[in-house]
Image (tube, rainbow, N blue to C red):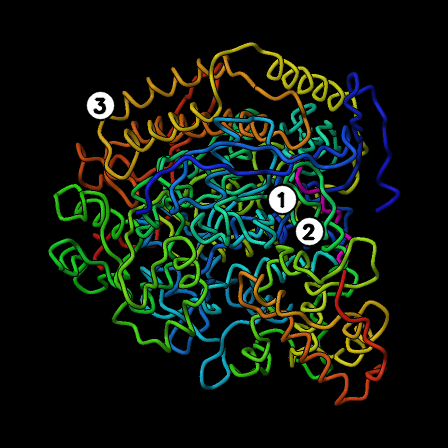
Amino acid sequence: MEHNLFYDFREAGPGEGMCDLVLDFDVIVVGGGMAGMRAALAAADSASVALITKVHPIRSASASSAGGINGALGPSDDPESYARDTIGGGDYLSDDQPVAILCEEAAETIIDMEHRGAAFYRDAGGRLALRRLGGHAVPRAAHAADWTGILLTQTLWEQLIGSGVTILDEWHVMRIVLEDGAAVGIVALDLRSGGLHSVSGRAVVLATGGGSGVYAVNTSPATNTGDGLAMALQAGLPLRDMEFVQFNPTGLHSTDGLIWNGVAVTEAARAEGSVLVNSAGDRFMEAYAADSRDVAPRDIVSRAVQSEIDEGRGFNGESVHLDSTGIDGETIAASLPHLRRLCIDLQGIDFADAPLQVVPAAHTSVGGIPTDTNGRTEIAGLHAAGECASTGIHGASSLAGNGATEALVFGRRAGLAAAQTAGGAGRVTGALDRAREDEAERISRLMNHPGGESVARLTKDLRATMSEGAGINRTHDGLTRCLDDLAKISDRMADIRIRSQNRRFNLELAGALGLANMVEVAQAIASSALRRTESRGSHHRVDHPDRDDSNMRRHTLAYRENGEIRLDPQEIEAGSAALEKRSY
Amino acid sequence: MAADLRRGIRIARYDPETHDSPEVHHYQVTVSGDMTLLGVLVDVEENVDPSLSFRYSCRGGICGACGVQANGMPVLACRTRISAIDTNDGQIEIAPLSNHPVIRDLVADLDPMLNRIASIDPWTQPDDGSPGSGMDSDMLQYEVERLGRSETCIACGLCDAAAPAASPSSEFLGPAALVRIYRHAADVRDGSDRQRLELVTGEGGIWDREPAEEWNVACPLEIEPANRIESLRAAAEANQVGKPGRKVSGAGV
C-alpha cells in the first residue's frame, strides 16, 4: 500500500518530535475485533483498506468470547429454529429480515472460518462439536474448549497478514469527518507517538464494540470506551435500543474490587455443567427457569442472581457461587482449561475443588448504531458492524454465542458494501484538515487546563452512577437521579487536569478521551431506559414489571442535539412471530 | 485475604526520546498479596506518578497486552498476584519485557516479533484435497489436539522475552514465530508442511537455539513452546528436511 501513504512533517509543537501523518485509503475500518477484521478482509478484495484500532487486533475484546459461535449446523437444527430462538430470546423486539440473514448465513460463516484455519473441536464422528448455550433449544455453538475467541481472532489476523490490509494499531480515532453529509475520513491520536493523524477514505466502517464499560462491574477491556457509539452520536446519527444492556450472570467477584473484578466466566462453564448456588445451598435457577435452569438466557439468569443477592441469599450479601465441583475432571480439562488456570492465577482457587464467587457484570450493548443488513447507516459512506451496530437481530436481549456470529456475518456484509461505496469518488482534504485542527486544539486545551478533576475519579463516579441507577433493576426515580448525576459528571469533565505533559503513551490523556465518550453512551442508555415504561428482555423496570406489547413493542432512537438526548420511537419490522410470554 | 502492607516497588522508567538508558524509580505503595501486578501499576499511575506508561486491556489474562518482567521473569501483569512474584528480600522490580525494543517505560514494542510471525506466511494453506464450501474439513479431534494448543498463541511475547531467546538484533525467529510454524505444519488441513519445515531449518530457525524450559514456564497459555519446537526438530529429522546435523549455537542471548 506504499502508494497510499504520504507523509507530512507538520510542526508538531516545540520539542515533541512528533510526526503527523496524512494518509489515504478507499476504506477505513475503525476497530480491530472480529467484526472489524472480517469487514477489512471482505473489503480488501477490491479496495485499499486501513484497519485502525486502539489495541492490536489480536488484543481485542473478541478474543475473550470463549463460549462459541452459533450456526444451524446440527442434525436436528435449521435456520428457522435458530431464528425462533433468537427472536424469542430477544423478547420479540427483533426485526425479522436481519434475523433471517443471520440464521441463514451463520453455518456457512462458521465453515468458512474452519476452512481459513480455525481449529474447532470435533465430535466422535469428526464433525464440528456443538455446545448448547443459554436460550438455545439445541446445541449450535461451534467452539474449541474455552478459547473460541482466541481461535477466531488469531485466524482472522493470519488472514489479514496475507490480505494487504494496512493495520494501524494503538491509534485512538477521535472523530469521523463529514463533508456534504458524507463520511470522508477520520482524525486519530497516535497513542505511541502522540501525533495526530488524518486519514481520508471514501467509506468508513465503525466496528468499535459496545459500551458496557460504563458500569462499575463489567467484563469489558479497559480500552473499550464506546468510542464508535459516541462518534456516531456526534456525527448526528441516533443510537438505537441502548436501554438494553446484556449482563453476563457470572462475572468474577472480587470482594476488594481488585482490577479483575467482573472478568467474565464464560457461558461455556454452565453449558458444561457448572451450577449457580445461593447461601442456603440451593440451586436457585430451578425457581426461575424450571426447564432450562442454569442455561436459560443471560438476562433471566442475571436477574435471578441479582434477586438472590438482594433478597439476602447471597454470600456476604455480595455474590453467589458458581459450583463446578460436580463436573468430572476430564470435562474440565477438555472444556475449561484456560478458565481454570486463570482462576488459579487470579484467586488461587481451583474451581474443580471449590466454588467461584460470581456477580452479574455488564457485558455487551444489545443496541447500537442502526444499520441496514449491509451495515449502511443514514450517513453516506458510514457503515457499522458488530457490537457497536444495531442490525435489529438481538431485540431486547442477545443470546449467548450470537455476538460472534453477528460480528462475522455482518462484518463481511459491511466490508463488501463499504468497498462498493468506495468506488468512484475522489479524495477530500478540506474538511479533514479543519477537523484535524479542531482535534489538535481539543487535545491542547485538555493537556493545558489547570483543572481540579481527575480522570480516574470521574471514571469511577460514572461507573458507580450507572450501576446504581441504570443497572439490572431500574425505576423512574432511579433513572431520573442517574441522569442528573450524569449531567454533573459531564460538567465536571470540563475541569479535568492531565497531570503528565508527555504525549507518548499518556494513559491519562487516553483515559480522558475515552471517558468523554463513555459519558455520552451512558446518557443514551439512561435516557432510553427512562422512556421504556415496560420490562422486556434485558431491560427490567421494577415500576413496570410487565411487557407492554401494545405501546412499547418499538425500537428507541436516541439522538444527541445541543448536548441533550432526544428520543424517538421507531416501528420494528416484524410480523410472523407469535407473541408469546417467554418461558424457559 | 493477605494483609495490606506498605512496600517498595522498583520500576524501570525509560523514555528513549529523552534518555540514553533506563532509570529505576522507587515507589512506596500499599498492596495486599491478593492484588495483581496490574492493579499495583494502575494504582501507581492513578495515585503516585501519572507519567508512568504501561500497556493493558482485558484485565483477565487473554489479550496478551500487559507483559512485563517481574524480578526478571516475563509475566502478564494482569494474571500475576503480588504474592506469586518470586522474591528473596521482599523487593519487587518491574521492567519492560526483555528482548523486545522499548517504546516508553514498561511498554515494549512487540512489532518486531509480530513481523517475524508475519514473515512465515502464518495462514492456513489448504491441501489440494480440501473440501469445497458447505462442509467442514476432514479433521478429527485427536488431530486438533495434536496442535498442542499452539493454535491458542496470543502473541503476548513472553516466550520471546525469556532467556535465552532472540535478542532484537539476532536472526533468530524466536519461539513465538516457531510455534506459529508448528501450528500450521502440524495441521492436517495445511498442504505446505514441507515448505514450512524447510523454512524453519534455515538461518534463524529451529537449530539456532536449544529449546529452553524457560519458554515453557513463561507461556501463560501452557503451549509449551520448547516442546512444540522439539516436535518441529523431530519432524525435520524424520523427513530429512534441512540440515539437522548443523552446529547448534547453544544457549546465551
In the image: residue A457, left or right of residue B150:
left
Q: Is A547 displayed left or right of A209 in the figure?
A: left
Residue that numbered label 2 is attached to: B98
In the image, which residues are magenta?
A162-171
Closer to the camera in the image, A394 or A328: A328
* Above or below, comparing residue A385 to residue B201 in the picture: above
Label 2 amino acid? Ser
Q: CA distance from mark 3 to mark 1?
A: 50 Å
Question: Callout 3, which amino acid?
Answer: Asp
Residue A37 falls inside the magenta stretch:
no
Residue that appears at 41% across and 73% down: A333
Disc number placed over residue B95 in the picture, else none: 1
Say few, some or many: other residues with alpha carbon within 10 Å of mark 3 (under 14 / 14 to 19 / 20 or more): few
> Tag 1's secondary structure?
strand
Above or below — where is A16 with respect to B39?
above
Q: What is the residue that sits farthest to the front in this orientation? A: B89
